[in-house]
Amino acid sequence: MKTLLVIDMQQAWLESERFEKEQVLARIEFAANQIRQQQGKVIFIQHCNEQAPSGSAGWQLADNLTVTTEDLLIDKTACDSFVGTSLLACLTELGTTELYICGLATEFCVDTTLRAAVSAGYSVVALSDAHTTGDRPHLTAAQIVEHHNWVWQNLAIPQGQQLQVRTVAEAFPTDLKSTSS
């Protein structure tokens, strides 16, 4: 089964400037709809801390992301979406064979979860144009996204594992319309 992880696309983190925020949200929405149409599962991961306590306005997902009754929501408190959560058990129960990863922030929770997923034995597809971050003192957000896409393409992974870095259009080759901009 194909499963899409949407990491930390929450109100608290989207209030600040994020690289291609609207385009990334549109691509994530498109990817989620494609996964659902293919009888896959969408899992929204939500970070909980003092800025975004569970149930608070900041903890809520972005308004323009659709959450269906079939989707799963998992709270986390660390960059690694597997640590201290039910994610591994959910993926096992679902029979996930291919894991698509997107969200925020590229260099923190997306990267950490992606590496953990590969190490856990999952075939991973990093959606290269569906993750975002903000500018940092030493790099722009665009540079961080570009850097991580390159790192993931060149990451030494366990033998027999698969890690692909694909745009949403490459991963779901249909008419993207305005989401490919």
Image (cartoon, rainbow, N blue to C red):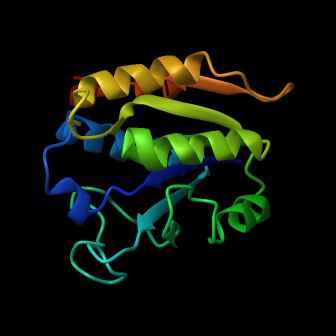
Q: Quadrant of residue 165?
A: top right
The furthest residue to the front: 138
In the image, taking residue 84 as reference, residue 44 lies left or right, namely left
Q: Position of residue 175 (x, y in %)?
A: 35, 24
Q: Nearer the viewer, residue 48 or 70?
A: 48
Image spot of residue 107 (x, y percent): 42, 39
Which residue is at 74% across, 67% downward?
A: 89
Q: Is residue 45 left or right of residue 124?
A: left
Instruction: Please determine whether, in this image, residue 99 is positioned above or below residue 86.
Output: above
Dividing the picture into quadrants, the one containing residue 90 is bottom right
Residue 121 vs 51, above or below: the answer is above
Side of 22 where 75 appears, left or right:
right
Q: Position of residue 163 (x, y in %)?
A: 66, 27
Using the rendered image of the protein, determine whether residue 33 is visible from the camera's viewpoint: no
List the single residue furthest toward the bottom.
Answer: 55
Q: Nearer the viewer, residue 27 or 158?
A: 158
Q: Is residue 102 at least partly visible in the picture?
A: yes
Q: Say if 144 sits above or below 154 in the image.
A: below
Q: Residue at x 41, y 21 (%)?
A: 147
Q: Which part of the image, by quadrant, shows the C terminus?
A: top left
- What residue lies at 50% left-to-right and 56% top-to-bottom? 79
**Is 51 on the left or on the right of 48, as rendered?**
left
Q: Which residue is painted at 33% across and 37% down in the image?
A: 27
User: Is residue 54 placed above or below 9 in the rendered structure?
Assistant: below
